[in-house]
Image (cartoon, rainbow, N blue to C red):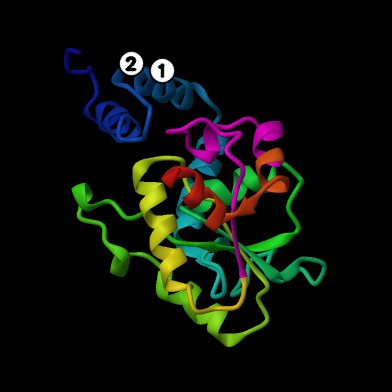
Amino acid sequence: MNSLPSKVFETAVNELAKLPGIGRKTALRMALHLLKSRREDAESFGMAIIRMHNEIRYCLDCGNISDNELCSICGNPKRDKSIVCVVEDIRDVIAIENTGQYAGVYHVLGGIISPMEGIGPDELNISGLVGKVESGGIAEIILALPTTIEGDTTNFYIYKRLGSATIHVTAIARGISVGDELEHTDEVTLGRSIVNRTLYEKTIQKKNQ
């Protein structure tokens, strides 16, 4: 695409094009839309982004995004604190919450083990999960990571780290296709996968048969 007639406008397009899934042409359309918008709407859009960076915190308990020290899930007395669902990132928390089928709490790892990308166990919030279990009060850990090689590797690593704990370690049912990420799974399928979860040990046995 040729250079644009305004350097200021071109800078805005370039910044929008950095967003995931946004190509140069889409960024151009978005910038034109913002340019034609009312000044108040454009300022509101910009302030929302700035406020997000300045004010959003990460929950001290689970790692989810929050406006306070504890997120709305961990701070909800109606949630079952004895059941912890382990997810890759915040997008998965949102996806599972949208199903309306889960009443426990979460633990956000911040990624999954991926040697190709230089991500090992020490780069993830796995020690925090182990610490929660060792502190007591947890009856079940649900492994809800992507059905990929990296996801399976992370599941197995966590399972081995929790091997001596007297708790149930379960995994979401394989209604989700291999290679799928939770955020791309429809709510009905994901909800059923949570409800129909099985003991993780059984999933290992099936793979070895």
Magenta segment: does it hold 25?
A: no
Whether residue 49 appears in this view of the structure is: yes
Q: Which residues are magenta?
A: 168-191
Expressed as whole percent of the image width and height from the top left, the position of residue 187 reads 68, 34
**Of 37 and 96, the residue lying toward us:** 96
Residue type at mark 1: give it.
Arg
The answer to the question of whether label 2 and label 1 lie on touching residues, with beta carbons closer than 8 A, is yes
Please give the name of the residue rendered at 49% of the width and 50% of the height, measured from the top-left corner. Answer: 205
* Farthest residue, direction right: 78
Q: Secondary structure at mark 2?
A: helix
Q: Residue at x 21, y 28 (%)?
A: 7
Residue designated by label 1: 29
Q: Is residue 48 visible?
A: no
Residue 95 vertical position relative to residue 90 in the rendered view, above or below: above
Residue 17 is marked as none
Kind of element beneath mark 1? helix
For disc 2, the neighbor class at 10 Å (few under 14, some 14 to 19, many from 20) is: few
In the image, 199 versus 46, the foreground residue is 199
Q: Which mark is residue 25?
A: 2
The relative height of residue 88 versus residue 190 in the rendered view (above or below) is below
